Amino acid sequence: LLSGKTFVITGTLPSLSRDQAKDMLEAAGAKVAGSVSKKTDYLLAGSDAGSKLDKAVVFGVIVIDETLLMNMLNP
């Protein structure tokens, strides 16, 4: 499901560290990038997301939260 998709992680997640989220995404076949671009598929946004969230909205990137991420990882 996530194989070949590009994610960017921003903000503070409720129960995962960014490294944990990155490891889970990479284990599922996704790529985790450091900055948002037109090639980004999803932005995983926690609290205080900041400028990456603004950029994602401009580029039309799908914004998800930790709960949705877990649903995607465990369908």
Image (cartoon, helix red, strand yellow):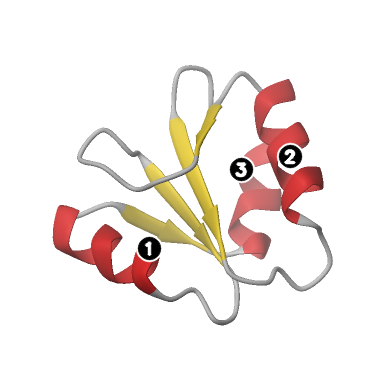
Residue 50 x/y as whole percent: 43, 76
Residue 58 located left or right of residue 17: left
Marks 3 and 2 sit apart, C-alpha to C-alpha, by 6 Å
The residue at which mark 3 appears reads as 72
Q: Residue furthest bottom?
A: 48
Marks 1 and 3 sit apart, C-alpha to C-alpha, by 21 Å
Marks 2 and 1 sit apart, C-alpha to C-alpha, by 26 Å
Which label lies toward us, 1 or 3?
1
Which label lies toward us, 2 or 1?
1
Residue 9 x/y as whole percent: 55, 53
Q: In this rendering, does residue 1 appear at all? A: no
Q: Secondary structure at mark 2?
A: loop
Closer to the N terminus: mark 2 or mark 1?
Answer: 1
The residue at which mark 1 appears reads as 52
Q: Residues within 10 Å of mark 1 (few under 14, many from 20)?
A: many
- Residue found at x 25% / y 62%: 55
Q: Are marks 3 and 2 in contact (CB under 8 Å)?
A: yes
Q: Amino acid at mark 1?
A: Lys
Closer to the N terminus: mark 1 or mark 3?
Answer: 1
- Residue found at x 44% / y 27%: 5
Q: Are marks 1 and 3 in contact (CB under 8 Å)?
A: no
The residue at which mark 2 appears reads as 74
